Every structure is written in C-alpha cells, then in structure tokens.
Amino acid sequence: MKKAIIVYESINHNTENLVGYLCRAVRKAGICDVTIKKVTETDVSELYDYNRILLASSFYLDSELQDDFIDFYEEMKGLDLKGKKAAAFGTGDNSISQFCSVNTILVDRLKRCGADIITGFEEDLYGIK
C-alpha cells in the first residue's frame, strides 16, 4: 500500500480541519496509509519514508510562509525527492490579492527537491490508478 504524509500548520484550525477531513476520507476508502504531522513535530528526513508528500499551510501576510513552516522549508534544501509525488494545499482568505500564494512557494521547493508535482486532484495521489 502506498504511504502518504501530510505535514501541516494551521493558524486558525481551518487547515488542520481540512487535513483531518482529507485523511479520514482516504483512510475510510482504504486506498492509502496516511500519516498526519504538524510541521513543528516533523523532521524533513521523514519525507523519505513516504511515496506521497502533501504540505498543507494557511497563507500568512499575503505571500509569506507562516512562521512554523520556515525552518522546515529551509531544511528541505538539498533533499532528493525524485520518484515521490507531492502537492501543497491550504486555506486562505480569497479577498487578499495573493490568495494562497504560500502553496506556490511550497510547490516550488518540492519541485527543486525533484518531486513530481500533482496539480489539481489526481486519483493517482492515493494509489487508485
């Protein structure tokens, strides 16, 4: 069975709730083993243990990473995530001009680490295909 990790931070619990809903749905369907971890409790080396990597964050001050994600993001430099599928998602206020731009920042880092980026919803993320 494929293994996925969702590494998240959540300022107002919105992203945390979204991660919980996603995890419960995947577990109920039995299509992927999912681990959820707060970014502050995750070592970047743990990403090597998973086939699928999801980074979930709310956005902060238009286009900056939330403080809890900064160290993790920096420590990702130099990781080799080739062969892993990855994505970033989160929550935000769509009235702000840079709505959810932090997802772009996280996806860029995943790309630089060599991960195959999943765009939109792809069933293969959960091993259905």
Image (tube, helix red, strand yellow):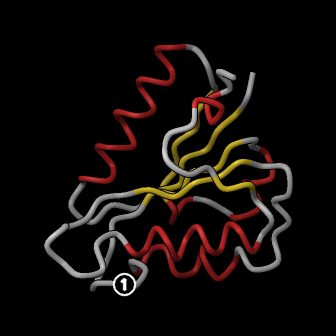
**Secondary element type, mark 1:** loop
Task: Between residue 8 and residue 100, name the one nearer to us.
Answer: 100
Q: Quadrant of the N terminus?
A: top right
Q: Name above or below for residue 104 compared with residue 84.
A: below
Q: Is 75 positioned to the left or the right of 48 in the image?
A: left
What residue do we see at 74% from left, 43% from top? 50
What residue do we see at 60% from left, 73% from top? 72
Q: Quadrant of the C terminus?
A: top right
Task: Between residue 16 and residue 25, name the one nearer to us.
Answer: 25
Q: Residue furthest top?
A: 29
Q: Residue furthest left?
A: 95
Residue 111 image point, x, y percent: 71, 68
Residue 60 image point, x, y percent: 31, 79
**Other-residue count near label 1 (Cα within 10 Å), few / some / many at <14 / 14–19 / ≥20:** some
What residue do we see at 40% from left, 62% from top? 9
Residue 49, quarter of the rendered image: top right
Residue 20, quarter of the rendered image: top left
Q: Name above or below for residue 94 compared with residue 2.
A: below
**How many numbered circles are shown?**
1
Residue type at numbered disc 1:
Ser
Residue 4 image point, x, y percent: 64, 38
Would you name the residue on which mark 1 appears? 63
What residue do we see at 39% from left, 85% from top? 64
Residue 85 image point, x, y percent: 71, 48
Q: Is 14 positioned to the left or the right of 123 in the image?
A: left
